[in-house]
Amino acid sequence: MKNIRVIARLDVKNDYLVKGINLEGLRKIGDPNEFAKRYYEQGADEIIYMDIVASLYNRNNLTDIIRKTTEDIFIPITVGGGIRSVEDAQKILKSGADKVAINTAAIKRPELISEISNKFGSQCMVLSIEAKKISDSKWEAYYDNGREKTGIDVIEWAKKGYELGAGEILLTSVDMEGTKKGFDYELIKNVSEIIPIPVIASGGMGKFEDMEKVVTDSRADAVAIASVLHYKRTDIQTLKEESINAGINVRRKYSE
């Protein structure tokens, strides 16, 4: 069985770590660098930074945060929000990120996926998909932090993203995000079954059993966790110990 990655997701607005429910009602939590360092020390496999207002202002404001983070943290960092071109991606990668996550710009101009993949390698190109359920076994892709409809079917969009060169999918259920009621397991499973690239499950983690179900029944390759870490309802070390006890392959530390 593959190693399952445990990823800490940090949504950032201006210079603050924030968290909401269904990507709305955002509350300030604190300094994102302090939280990122804590999760690194707990054994996180990766960090995801999302500038959640970047698309509104047509820019990503995380370069200083990334530079500071990489002084103390030595695990892969993915950065998303407001990346609209190869040049924007290059700036983020030069700041210390290992991957870029694209949502809004990819929906508006899908060829950007291929441009970034061809320039930096598919391993750097993460397609971020924000999904809302619209009927049984059917989800619509959204952008601008879950505010704008696209009319695009999530399953077809994930498949197209893979064909254009995405090396990974960050799949966020807007319906479950921040609720701590569990992932949208059907969504994760449907996407995981049609594409051969890793799928990161995001949105809804509330307890270890949610993680166990999404990686065993729904075939996620990684879980992105936010609320339960930020509010100390659990920690990464505990989740990894529970995973090992349940027979799920995880690395105790990224260096292993």
Image (tube, rainbow, N blue to C red):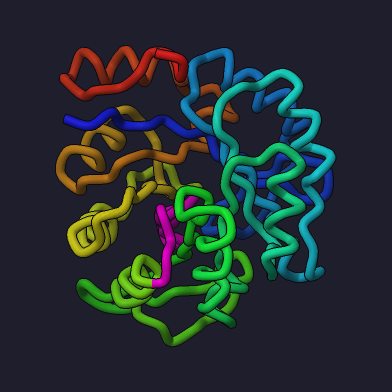
Is 88 situated left or right of 228 in this image? right
Q: Residue sitting at 28 percent across and 16 percent down?
A: 242
Is 40 situated left or right of 88 in this image? left
Q: Residue sitting at 78 percent across and 31 percent down?
A: 31
| The residue stretch that appears in magenta | 164-177
Q: Along the line of sight, which residue is nearer the eye, 144 or 108? A: 108
Q: Residue furthest front?
A: 119
Q: Assign the C terminus to one quadrant of the image.
A: top left
For residue 115, what is the image quadrant?
bottom right
Q: Position of residue 128 (x, y in %)?
A: 49, 60
Placement of 121 over or under 139, stated as above or below:
above
Q: Assign the N terminus to one quadrant of the image.
A: top left
Q: Along the line of sight, which residue is nearer the eye, 61 or 35? A: 61
Residue 73 colored magenta?
Answer: no
Q: Residue sitting at 62 percent across and 59 percent down?
A: 24
Residue 167 colored magenta?
Answer: yes
Q: Along the line of sight, which residue is nearer the eye, 165 or 180? A: 165
Q: Residue sitting at 49 percent across and 17 percent down?
A: 43
